[in-house]
């Protein structure tokens, strides 16, 4: 139960509503229990004298008791169940807020499908604990106590006989509940795997079709789905076993009441009305017994799901504003310094970057080159604190990036990622995503600089055209130019282009670079590219190798040096000559 302790703060928030809800439960059960006492008196009264007046009197009393109980039963759902929905909303909102603040490292180590399973299945299981489980727990205990008190008043001896099978029930529910908890945990894990598989399948549908793997994926899904069904059916069988046992135990109690109670009636120790009341009260206990078993299931499932959610809530943010953050910093100019910087992705991973020392003056353009896997993207990711360096420090305008408020830092840095991502929304909203309010003029200007405006003019709804999920309706070049426009529209002081023209033809790339020269005047720009033509006009070029700066200088200086850069340059010249020959 310790996993459910985190929900305490949510219960406290709605304590007033819950108090009234629990009070309504007591009133509803009092009405139900009192209705049986009226039935007992009516049977005894009608045994002595059957008349229309007596029938009407007791009939109206029974209906009145039922209406009283029903009215408060309605109010129970309007309080306790509504509270469970409100707590579900709060929990889902807190989960979403927490997920948004987790570092990129978490998303690299955890599948999207698994996170989605937490956000849907697990939160729903916790909601079932918060609502039905809590409501029926209080309802069951209240009814059980009220009925038990009245049964003891009616006949203590018969009550003891009737309750004899209940200890067996408690032991059985404990054992089965423990088994349900274990099974449900396994089912939730399997559901996460299944969700991950479905998500990957939808995301990679082009690859699946390109390699004609539809049949293979269908078979793989069928195997995983069947395994999930098998695990689910194992749980269903256990739950199905529990219910008949509950009915059997309450049935045994009813037989005991009829047998021993009948003897007491014969011996004039009890009357017929009391025996009838006993049987009705035992009937009233059937639902609490069933609810008890159901509640055990919900509690076990809720605890298993909350355990999984708590694991996520325990994940540290790593990158956030702290007491070291200088709130007086409202702006950045663009001077960037790397001082003896080292970086690795995990505690037991090798260093991706080692001993990086680099100064990028405000308003300058720097290019980063190197073979695949040399740490180019890792280097620029340290500037907006998508990751923090593991040694050394990164400075902007002389301030450690950790001291700059994240909202100031990131709203002044425009990034075009290596793999552009577009939302399933309009072109306008995708470009203006970083703006607090959509500004059409800025969007049009940014699109023109990125050479994307002509493409938009060809779209059926222009800037209101809906982009498919992940930009599936766009070509690679269109996605890159749309992403570039999105980075430019926020008017950044620093812009980072991470291999952002790989899908753009050389002529369009040249036009974009010319536009960027004018736009980036007085701003700092960092360009990562494999194309010499993209980086040759940079103020300085650095070449990474083995996580270190191997070469640094202008295009002409590096050609003269005759190192890695020169080798890349000559190879690309050779490629161009071969293309011309072909």
Image (cartoon, helix red, strand yellow):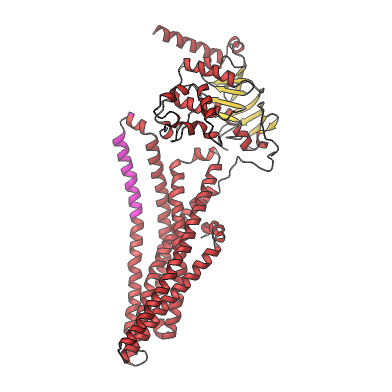
Q: In which quarter of the image is the C terminus?
A: top left
Identify the residue at image location x=54%, y=46%: 97
Question: Is residue 410 in view?
Answer: yes
Identify the residue at image location x=53%, y=17%: 534
Magenta segment boundaries in residue numbering:
210-233
User: In the rendered view, does 553 fall on the left or right side of 168?
Assistant: right
Q: Where is residue 157 in the image (x, y as percent from the top left)?
A: 41, 85
For this rendering, which residue is in front, 384 or 294? 384
Q: Quadrant of residue 136?
A: bottom left
The verdict on residue 514 being magenta is no
The furthest residue to the left = 215
User: In the rendered view, does 51 fall on the left or right side of 30?
Assistant: left
For this rendering, which residue is in front, 510 or 317? 510
Question: Is residue 155 in view?
Answer: no
For this rendering, which residue is in front, 128 or 372? 128
User: In the rendered view, does 155 fall on the left or right side of 333?
Assistant: left
Q: Position of residue 47 (x, y in %)?
A: 31, 90
Specify the principal SS of the magenta part. helix
The verdict on residue 232 being magenta is yes
Q: Where is residue 73 in the image (x, y as percent from the top left)?
A: 43, 69
Q: Position of residue 472 (x, y in %)?
A: 40, 31
Identify the residue at image location x=67%, y=35%: 330
């Amino acid at each position: 139960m310790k996993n459910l302790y985190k929900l305490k703060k949510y219960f406290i928030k709605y304590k007033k509503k819950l108090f009234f809800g629990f009070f309504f439960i007591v009133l509803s059960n009092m009405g139900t229990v009192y209705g049986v006492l009226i039935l007992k008196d009516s049977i005894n009264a009608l045994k002595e004298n059957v008349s229309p007046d007596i029938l009407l009197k007791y009939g109206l009393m029974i209906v009145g008791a039922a209406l009283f109980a029903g009215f408060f039963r309605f109010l129970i759902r309007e309080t306790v169940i509504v509270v469970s929905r409100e707590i579900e909303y709060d929990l889902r909102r807190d989960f979403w807020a927490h997920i948004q603040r987790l570092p990129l490292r978490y998303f690299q180590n955890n599948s999207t499908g698994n996170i989605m399973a937490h956000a849907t299945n697990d939160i729903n299981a916790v909601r079932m604990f918060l609502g039905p489980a809590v409501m029926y727990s209080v309802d069951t205990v209240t009814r059980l106590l009220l009925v038990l008190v009245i049964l003891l008043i009616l006949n203590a001896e018969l009550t003891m006989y009737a309750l004899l099978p209940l200890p067996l029930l408690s032991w059985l529910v404990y054992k089965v509940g423990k088994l349900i908890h274990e099974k449900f945990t396994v089912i939730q894990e399997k559901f996460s795997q299944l969700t991950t598989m479905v998500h990957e399948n939808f995301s990679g549908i082009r690859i699946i079709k390109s390699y004609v793997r539809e049949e293979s994926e269908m078979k793989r899904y069928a195997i995983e789905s069947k395994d999930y069904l098998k695990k689910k059916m194992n749980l269903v069988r256990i739950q199905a076993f529990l219910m008949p046992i509950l009915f059997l135990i309450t049935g045994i109690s009813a037989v005991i009441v009829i047998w021993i109670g009948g003897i007491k009636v014969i011996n004039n120790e009890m009357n017929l009305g009391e025996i009838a009341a006993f049987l009705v009260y035992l009937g009233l206990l059937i639902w609490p017994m069933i609810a008890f078993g159901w509640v055990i299931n919900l509690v076990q499932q809720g605890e298993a799901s909350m355990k999984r959610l708590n694991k996520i809530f325990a994940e540290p943010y790593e990158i956030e504003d702290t007491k070291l953050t200088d709130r007086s910093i409202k702006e950045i100019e663009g001077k960037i310094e790397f001082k003896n910087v080292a970086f690795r992705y995990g505690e037991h991973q090798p260093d991706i970057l080692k001993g990086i020392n680099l100064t990028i003056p405000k308003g300058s353009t720097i290019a980063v080159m190197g073979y695949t896997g040399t740490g180019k993207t890792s280097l620029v990711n340290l500037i907006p604190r998508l990751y923090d360096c593991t040694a050394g420090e990164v400075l902007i305008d002389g301030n450690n990036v950790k001291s700059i408020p994240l909202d100031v830092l990131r709203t002044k840095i425009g990034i075009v990622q290596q793999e552009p991502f577009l939302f399933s929304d309009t072109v306008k909203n995708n470009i203006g995503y970083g703006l607090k309010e959509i500004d059409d003029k800025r969007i049009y200007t940014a699109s023109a600089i990125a050479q994307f405006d002509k493409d938009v003019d060809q779209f059926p709804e222009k800037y209101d055209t809906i982009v498919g999920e992940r930009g599936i309706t766009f070509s690679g070049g269109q996605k890159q130019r749309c992403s570039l426009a999105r980075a430019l529209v926020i008017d950044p002081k620093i812009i980072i282009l991470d291999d952002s023209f790989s899908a753009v033809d050389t002529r369009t790339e040249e036009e974009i670079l010319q536009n960027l020269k004018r736009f980036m005047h007085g701003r700092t720009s960092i360009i990562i590219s494999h194309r010499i033509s993209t980086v040759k006009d940079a103020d300085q070029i650095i070449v990474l190798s083995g996580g270190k700066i191997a070469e640094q200088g202008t295009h002409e200086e590096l050609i003269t040096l005759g190192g890695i850069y020169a080798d890349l340059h000559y190879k690309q010249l050779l490629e161009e000559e071969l293309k011309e020959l072909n």
